[in-house]
Amino acid sequence: MQKWNVKNILDWTINYFKDKNIPQPRLSAELLLSSVLNLTRINLYLNYDRILNNKELAVYKKYILKRLEHIPIQYILKEAYFRKIKLYVDSGVLIPRPETELIVEKAFQLLKGNLEREIINILEIGTGSGAISISVAYEISDELGVSDESWRVIATDNNPDVLEIAEKNAKSILDSSKFKNIRFIGCDLLPEESSDFFKQYEKKINIVISNPPYISEEDYKDLPREVKEYEPKSALLAGKTGLEVYEKILTRIKPYLSHELCYILFEIDPEKSALLKEMSEDIIGPKEIIVDKDHNQRDRILIIKI
């Protein structure tokens, strides 16, 4: 029987994935094998001669078979990395993207010059795995040099199973002093104006963050197989134009917004930035709207200054 060491099995898997047209064959092989052996990707190459035992080979084979079905690596491993945290993910939640990390960075930049208020209230609409809200809670005290008594994060989602995942992630990632300041609420975008939550936060939200569904019906048809077949449709498809959810948020958010300090941050489809900017001006009538670009110099974050 052949003895498989790290080098041999990596080389074999990369070539196999290439033959089967699996996207990013080297990255796929490295991430899956790293998980099986509990090694970093760099350490794989420092352990080239390590022989895999039968149990490790069995798990790795199972992962390979799943990857051949184009199941995303994050769903195979039940984990995804976002900024400084590792999240549990499954097919019920959208896989967090690297470009979404920019919206957290932008929120911190906007807040750094506005620390004189007693409490900073941050609202995320459509939290999914909790990546954005948990990252904010995890980093905010260090990023802004403030105490854990000076901020609150509220995260909403309309799916109770998704909220359960987000709260599970928060409990596993945040220490108790931070976890007590994050709140998860089940609702369709926002709680009703008759709710206790509305009474508590009316005109008190300083930062609104959302990465809502923004894929149009036409564009959804052309999504890669890995996305269309495995990621939740409800987290991707917005409607005929792709702007439907933004419009709902903008229409309903106004009573929550602080008149002293408030920004709305949307992740956007680069192709829809001009349309969304026009919509935001019509509905909100803001002081200023800025569009920030991602690492590929594409319009990615719409910043609305109230």
Image (cartoon, rainbow, N blue to C red):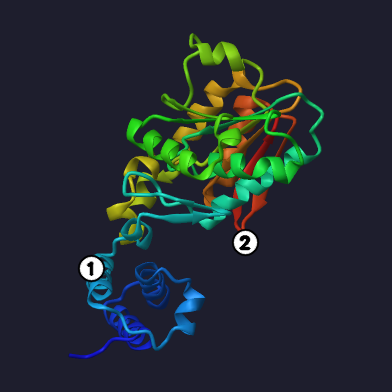
Residue 59 pos. (x, y %)? 25, 68
Q: Nearer the viewer, residue 18 or 142?
A: 142
Q: Residues within 10 Å of mark 2 (few under 14, many from 20)?
A: few
Looking at the rendered structure, the kind of residue marked 2 is His
State which quadrant residue 233 falls in: top left
- On the rendered structure, is 144 left or right of 177? right
Q: Is residue 296 above or below residue 251?
A: below
Image disc number at residue 295: 2
Residue 231 pos. (x, y %)? 33, 50
Residue 9 pos. (x, y %)? 32, 84
Residue at 66% x, 20% y is: 204
- On the rendered structure, is 303 left or right of 193? right
Q: Nearer the viewer, residue 255 or 145?
A: 145
**Is residue 22 visible from the viewing direction of this image?**
yes
Q: Nearer the viewer, residue 255 or 146?
A: 146
Tag 1 or tag 2, which sits nearer the N-term? 1
Looking at the rendered structure, the kind of residue marked 1 is Lys
Image disc number at residue 62: 1
Residue at 51% x, 11% y is: 196
